[in-house]
Amino acid sequence: MELVCLGEILIEMIAAEQGKHLHEVSAYVPTTGGLIAHVAIAARRLGMRSAFIGKVGDDAFGHHLHNVLRTEGVGTSGLRFDGNARTTLSLRTMPEDGLPEYIHYRNPGADLLLRPDELDEQLLSEARIFHFGSLSVMNDPGRSATQRAISLVDQSDSLISFGVNYQPSMWHDADEARTRIRTFLPFAHLVIVDHMDLQILCGTEDPVKGSDLILDYGPIVCIAIGADGSAIARTENSIQQAGSLPEGIVDTSGSRAAFTAGFLWRILGENDWRKSLQDDRLQSCLRFGSAAFLLTANHQGILETLPDAPSLADFVQRNYSST
């Protein structure tokens, strides 16, 4: 298996009316939510063999999400159903001030209840890349399951990718988030953050200063993504950068997942993932990630905007001087 993703999948209810606060919206439209699930789907769209490990409720929403993954071609042998917890629901709207509002219905939700003994260990042992997110390290049993998964893939010398996704409404406070997330930084070879993640982890939104601080924890590479699709890649001895392009930003909801999938897809061009994280190859990976971000951000929605491999390759060829 080329990519195994462990993390959250849920039902996200998107406001049918934009520019309003949560309590002002009259209707919501359900869709598949969860950044880590989106990464698995985005990677499959690009032609990677991907699989998802996580948990849903043994309810109508949970079985619907299972069917979505299967329809997209994502492996589901690692998906578990919980008979005692409901599939998580999240409501989201975008008020006029441009900052999204969320309400998450967890008490707790099934996506946070994956246990170590429920892991598909065979699937993990076969992964070339293992990607997990910060919501999985919030609480036990999910945190222990994530730690167990990391130990299994580390034995196989797989690339371990950590996608930080700090959402204030999901944590009790910023100190808790900072502590939990920092604890897992040393286990990753690749860490992907945005400006909000840098602020909570490092006290700065500056991508160079913030990524330098993250590298002190031990990752080989830190990727910092800007809101406009620009990104930098920091290693111990160098910095690579892919700037944003003059394309209209419509909706960035699925862009983080698209960036991650595009970057990881390009890494698979080498048999040894460490070669892909060296300077010359790293620049190409960064371009493809940023291109996937922008392709997705040019349209409204999430799953319907994730690009396929020909579209992404064509976009890179048209907009970047080299790949």
Image (spheres, rainbow, N blue to C red):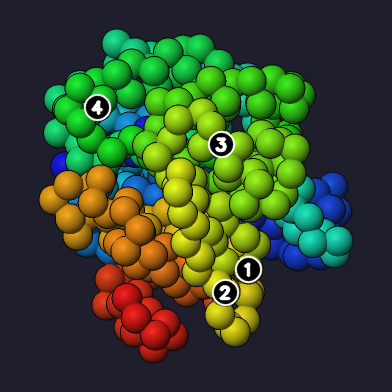
Residue type, numbered disc 3: Ile
Residue type, numbered disc 1: Asp
Residue type, numbered disc 2: Ser
Task: Give the mark nearest the N terminus, 1 or 4.
Answer: 4
Q: Is residue 151 visible?
A: yes
Q: Residue 84 or 218: which is nearer the viewer?
A: 218
Image quadrant assignment for residue 175: top right
Instruction: Report crowding for label 1: few under 14, some 14 to 19, many 20 or more residues within 10 A (C-alpha).
Output: some
Q: Is residue 296 visible?
A: no
**C-alpha separation, residue under disc 3 versus residue under disc 1:** 22 Å
Contact flag, marks 4 and 3 (Cβ < 8 Å) = no
Q: Residue 245 or 240: which is nearer the viewer?
A: 240
The residue to which callout 4 is attached is 153
Q: Secondary structure at mark 2?
A: loop
**C-alpha separation, residue under disc 4 versus residue under disc 2:** 34 Å
Residue 112 % position (x, y): 50, 23
The residue to which callout 3 is attached is 214
Instruction: Report crowding for label 3: few under 14, some 14 to 19, many 20 or more residues within 10 A (C-alpha).
Output: many
Decide: is 281 above or below 69. below
- In the picture, the quarter occupied by the C terminus is bottom left
| 3 or 1: mark nearer the eye | 3
Decide: is 262 above or below 299. above
Residue 261 % position (x, y): 37, 56
Contact flag, marks 1 and 2 (Cβ < 8 Å) = yes
Q: Residue 78 or 105: which is nearer the viewer?
A: 78
Task: Give the mark nearest the N terminus, 4 or 2.
Answer: 4
The residue to which callout 1 is attached is 228
Task: Give the mark nearest the N terminus, 1 or 2.
Answer: 1
The residue to which callout 2 is attached is 244
Instruction: Report crowding for label 2: few under 14, some 14 to 19, many 20 or more residues within 10 A (C-alpha).
Output: some
